[in-house]
Amino acid sequence: MSFKNKTVIITGASSGIGEETAKAFLSSGAKVILVARNKGKMEASFGSYDQNQYVIYPFDLSQIDEIDSFVSRIIENQGPIDILFNNAGIGSESLFEETDLSVFHELIQLDYFSVIYFTQSILRHMLENGGGHIATNTSVAGLITSKGRTAYSSAKFALHGFFDSLRIEVEDRNIFITLIAPGKVQTNFGVNKLDSEGTPFGSKSKKPVGLSSKKAAQIILKAIKKKKRQAIISKWSDVAWFGIIVNKFCPSLYVFLAKRINV
Ligand SMILES: NC(=O)c1ccc[n+]([C@@H]2O[C@H](COP(=O)([O-])OP(=O)(O)OC[C@H]3O[C@@H](n4cnc5c(N)ncnc54)[C@H](OP(=O)(O)O)[C@@H]3O)[C@@H](O)[C@H]2O)c1
């Protein structure tokens, strides 16, 4: 599939993986609709690109009841949508026994429900239009578990269940579903992730490691182009690969190791 003249919506386009994926789509000739809360950041990041090729739609995706009318407004103004990349998301890290349950509400609202609402609005439009492609950024934490990730893994595992089921419903109607599961990627994810009280880690966060967000974006475009059902986006040296393989073939060993390793 060539991306030239395709219209792509990317959520979480103001930073990290979403920002770089938007730039990669722009470089491939797509028209890109950028969604995130921070309008100023998107204006600054995309200022050097052709202004006819992208449009900024500031929006807070945690306002899930507004999503359907927001998507309708985009389609009314920008025309048919070929590709949706559900990318916006936030992480969390804290032991469950210490976690304020408001953290679960915040994560599930953004990382799970906003994706479901956005997907349903776009899917109905794509079905009327004869097809489309919905890619979603989940996480390796949506495939395997580790300490301190009960809230985050709940949301990301749920996305895998949802999209694997949806794919069976729609794949024969020219709707492609791609799940992108990154391991570690260098972004502001660690700074923005929530602690046990729901406060962003900020300067308490570790220095980001792993793939550059630019490299991650290249792999994401390739996965969408090849209509892959699932792509794991990670350096080969990332412990994520080891974890996925051990968990698949020897789940007891995985639990033994995961109790002892902080990732
Ligand atoms: N980096 C990693 O190591 C890693 C690993 C696995 C999975 N992921 C996944 O990758 C995705 C992107 O994360 P990232 O690493 O690129 O982190 P990031 O640099 O923190 O970017 C997060 C993006 O989400 C947007 N966002 C957050 N809350 C929002 C809201 N309420 N409404 C609209 N947009 C919102 C942010 O924009 P505004 O603040 O402007 O709204 C920002 O553009 C997430 O789904 C994350 O779970 C990342």
Image (cartoon, helix red, strand yellow):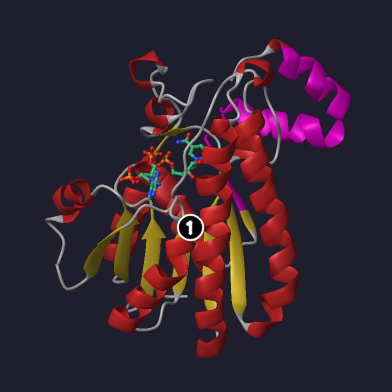
Quadrant of residue 236 within the rendered picture:
top right
| Magenta span of residues | 231-259
Taking the spot 87% from the left edge, 23% from the top edge, the residue there is: 252
Q: Nearer the viewer, residue 5 or 66?
A: 66
Neighbourhood count class around disc 1 (C-alpha, 10 Å): few under 14, some 14–19, many 20 upward: some
Q: Relative to 15, say whether 148 is above or below.
A: above
In the image, what residue type sits under mark 1? Ile
Q: In the displayed orientation, state which residue is furthest to the left.
A: 48
Q: Relative to 95, say whether 246 is above or below.
A: below
**Ligand 1 in which quarter:** top left
Whether residue 242 is in magenta: the answer is: yes
Left or right? Give the position of 131 relative to 41.
Answer: right
> Which SS type dominates the magenta stretch?
helix
Q: Which of 107 and 153 is in front in this view?
A: 107
Residue 217 drawn at (x, y percent): 41, 50
The reply to whether residue 243 is visible in this rendering is yes
Whether residue 49 is in magenta: the answer is: no
Quadrant of residue 174 within the rendered picture:
bottom right
Taking the spot 58% from the left edge, 50% from the top edge, the residue there is: 112
Left or right? Give the position of 151 relative to 55.
Answer: right
Taking the spot 54% from the left edge, 66% from the top edge, the residue there is: 119
Residue 114 drawn at (x, y percent): 51, 55
Q: Relative to 156, say whether 87 is above or below.
A: below
Residue assigned mark 1: 64
Residue 184 drawn at (x, y percent): 50, 32
